[in-house]
Image (cartoon, rainbow, N blue to C red):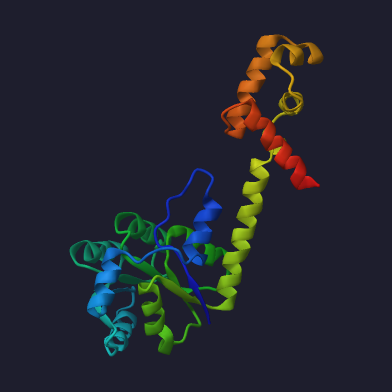
Amino acid sequence: MVRCSFTHQIRRAKNGRVEWLLRRFFSGDRALSVTDRERISSHAPIRVCVTCQTRLHREGLAHILNESAAVTVSALAASGPETMAHVSGMQIDIVLLDMALPNPLDIIRSLSSEFPATKVVAVGVPEEDRDLIDCAEAGVSGYLTRDYPLADVVAAIEAVASNEMRCSPRVAAALLRRVKRLSAAVAQASDPPARLTARELEILELIDEGLPNKTIARRLCIELPTVKNHVHNILEKLEVNGRAEAAARLRSYKLAQV
């Protein structure tokens, strides 16, 4: 098994989807929440809600979990609304959510949004990239895949409660592949050639040469107001505050291509 530490709550920056996914699963800089610290310092058991449509499954899992001193099953639920009601009405540290439920990703998003202190562990997740990434982006804090051994469930719950995640090498690889794809997409989107028209890029090249708007207008045989409009669009598209910063962005891009 691979142990990956992750950040449970992430502020999504404007273009920070990559940073969000990285910090969610692979950084170790997040301090435990106040609730986590209080529970750990008092040696209180981890409070779990088991959500599963099949009564036999949820009661069987609850019976096994309650045999551990580290875990107490505080609630059982058969649906998303029942889970939300339990989490709202009592202190639940972790929800074990069966992914066979109808619309499980919507349930995860609702729990993550309304009860950020409560962590969600997806149960019965196929080890397919799309399923794993969908769960990650919905807000899960851990996975129990379909082949996950019952004997390791308590250890997985303890890891999630300690702000860590136990995952198979396949899960870790899927997450890393997604990070790589997102990183490449964001990098491409931030490149001036990918964001500017041919005329805007031409004007940016002249700005980088230090030419003022009037000279650019004469060089390109266009009106001065047209140049000003292009410059305005360049600054807006590149999300920079001035001509010097736009030119610096272009130079950085050129250096990266060498």
Identify whether 66 is placed above or below 252: below
In the rendered structure, the answer to whether residue 181 lies left or right of residue 220 reads left
Identify whether 191 is placed above or below 163: above
In the rendered structure, the answer to whether residue 5 lies left or right of residue 250 reads left
Q: Residue at x 36, y 60 (%)?
A: 107
Q: Residue at x 64, y 26 (%)?
A: 243
Q: Residue furthest left?
A: 89
Q: Residue at x 61, y 70 (%)?
A: 173
- The image quadrant that residue 158 belongs to is bottom left
In the rendered structure, the answer to whether residue 143 lies left or right of residue 41 reads right
User: Whole-percent x and y of residue 250?
Assistant: 71, 35
Identify whether 121 is placed above or below 65: above
- The image quadrant that residue 150 belongs to is bottom left
User: Whole-percent x and y of residue 236?
Assistant: 58, 28
The answer to whether one can see residue 68 in this image is yes
User: Whole-percent x and y of residue 228?
Assistant: 64, 16
